[in-house]
Image (cartoon, grey):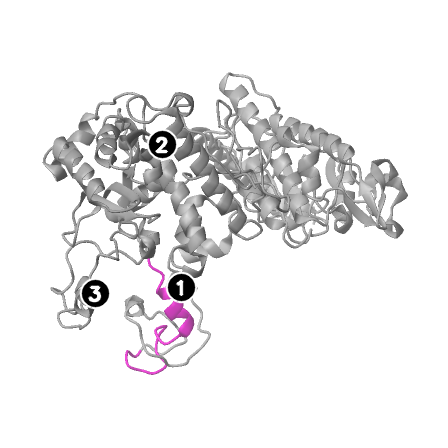
Amino acid sequence: MILRNIAIRHGRRALAAPLPTSQLRSLSTETTTLPQQTDLLPPTFSNQSTLENSAESGPKQLRITQRLGQAKPYHRAKKDPQIKRDFQLKKTIERTTGKLGALVEPHYEPSQLLVDPPTPQDVTLELLMASQSHLGHATSQWNPANSRYIYGVRQGVHIISLEETAAHLRRAAKVVEGVAYHGGLILFVGTRKGQSACVVRAAEMAGGCHLFERWLPGTITNGDQILRRCRMKAIDQHDKELQGYDDKIENWQALKPDLVVNLNPIENYLLLHECSLNNIPTIGVIDTDANPTWVTYPIPANDDSLRCMQVIAGVLGRAGEAGQKRRLAAAESGEVTWLPPPNLGAPVSEAEKIKRNELKKEAILKKRKADHEAIEQSKVTAAQRELGDFDDF
Amino acid sequence: MPRPRFARLGLSLGSIKPSIRPVRTPCRSLFTVPPIENLEKMVNGIPEFLSPAAVDMAWTQYQGYMIERLNNLVAGGQWQNADVKQIAINYARDPNSAPIFNYASMAHNNHFFFEALQSHKVPIPQSLKTDLEKDFSSIETLQREMIVTASSMFGPGFVWLVHGSVGNTGKRGFRILTTYLAGSPYSGAHTRRQATDMNTESNAMGSSVARGPPANAVGAHGNHSKAPGPTVAPGGIDVQPVLCLNTWEHVYLPDYGVAGKMAYASCWWERVNWSLVARRLGKTEFNQPSKFQI
């Protein structure tokens, strides 16, 4: 499921405030011990006994209402200044003495690929080789369409050329940066086990969306149905939400991504097919057994190595981050690098909305009056005709 | 077989390349000697304190030796890329890995000492001076205390100025701490603090029991029985080292001779970089707020 950053999750809203008793349904009549809070709920059930002491009375004995009724308004725990002081002291000690003793040579730290991903400038052949991006599949699994990316064979396995990987990765990074600069929506997809963290991180950096579970067929072609619960918002060139578009957004078509980055195209053929039907460019990691024609910008690399996927997702996420930064900087200096959708128009202010509602009301009343008069008139003419009929005789 | 001699560090930063290396399996060095801010220390020594030869022996050669021994012990394991302080704290409670703790803690303490040296006299910043005078009545008293403590220590070690909780009063302030050999002042490595010379401590049962916490629970429960001050979890931070003096013999031997520890300590006091000490305490000259504002 594509999730916008601000999609409402109904479960969260339900738990935010206690449910009003009018929405509670009786699901169980078991008697249980009463916690204090549910005594505050008045028994308003029509199909339950209202006797205070009756075993079946009211919502108090219902297990579900006990759980739901206990929801209290969320409030922050009181801040203990001692905790803040201790934390600052710990950080100071760490900063001033943590690295004393020796220089640790640069090494591979798995978590650093997510915490501090490499930039497109950091892409070197050594990094790609250390991330096992050159290891392809067995020669019997080969897709001959990507023979141009293969360097050779070793121990029955195709070796992907590191220069090809680096060049294609840099090109893809340019594409991602350009799309982000022009205000495009980028979707990062990685549905294999373990790819969720890097996909989410890349989407976060590039200001786009992520998907790490199964792609629902039709999310683009049938988006109005599948994505109907996703909230949309209109933003200005500084990424601030704009008011006055509620009506337009209510009837707006489901959004489609402007670029899709896919870490495992072999398992996501449908996604890539839907993108091609809708003219959405795709970037995909093509292993030796994958078909490079499925994507617009292939990146020949080893899609079975998590480290390699974290490097690629990190690089593309960083490229998106740079593009976003450039876009916002241009907006600060007055230059807007993208165009709004043609049908969006100008925002409708509250006063304008009220005026329009008034006009609508007037129009409805007028129509009603006109209809009423027409009915009356038709009754009169029918009566006259009747009388006229009699006159004939 | 000639003893391996390490090349001088000179003006280049980074790893030490010894001219003669004993034969061992080829492995890249995981730790290298860290650079010090004022490079002229390495070449010209510290005027009126340590000669270039002494700095070469106490820093270049010794630190390189500690790091090489540490490399040999942790290479190939899960701690091979960890920070030296982390290694020391981890192995502080493992007596079977005592050499790893020794080399790591010694490398850390030695760097701590050399980092806070300056080639000229640095005045004490006023805010730091006020705080020190609160706990030591005057700077001269603090100086005298540190020098006398160093003199009275028999054998190699370090003399520390730390900031932390003072006794059970719950207040925090400065105090002087000694660590023998490669003892560590950090709370996490308290099992290897080595604050006293155990050879001069009494072996009697009574004294060792008196040193520890009371064994019975009388007065341990109830609202009025707790010791005043904040409760610190085991391993919690309550010690912040800010300054140390290295009293190992090889540091003062070339310049001051076997009997020159007191003279060495007096000269050291004139070359302490007090602005760095203030920075270690989290105070800067312009009183910038802490980076972490919650």
Please state the horizontal and vertical placement of residue B14, each as a whole percent of the image. Answer: 52, 30
Which-is-in-front pick, marks 3 and 1? 3
**Structural crowding at the residue carrying mark 1, measured as other residues with C-alpha within 10 Å and reported as few (<14), some (14–19) or many (≥20):** few
Tags 2 and 1 touching, CB below 8 Å: no
Name the residue tied to disc 1: A22
* Residue placed furthest toward the left: B137
Q: Real-space Cα distance between discs 2 and 3?
A: 37 Å
**Structural crowding at the residue carrying mark 2, measured as other residues with C-alpha within 10 Å and reported as few (<14), some (14–19) or many (≥20):** many
Image side of residue A363 versus residue A219, left or right: left
Query: Over which residues does the magenta segment extend?
Result: A51-73
Name the residue tied to disc 2: B115
Please state the horizontal and vertical placement of residue A129, each as a whole percent of the image. Answer: 71, 40
Mark sitting on residue B208:
3
Give the residue type that dot 2 points to.
Answer: Glu
Judge by depth and name the residue closer to the eye, B36 or A3.
Answer: B36
**Residue drawn at the location 24% of the way across and 28% of the way down:** B267
Membership of A70 in magenta stretch: yes
Q: Chain of mark 3?
A: B
**Residue drawn at the location 61% of the way across and 26% of the way down:** A181
Query: Vertically, is A64 above or below B156?
Result: below
Which-is-in-front pick, marks 2 and 3? 3
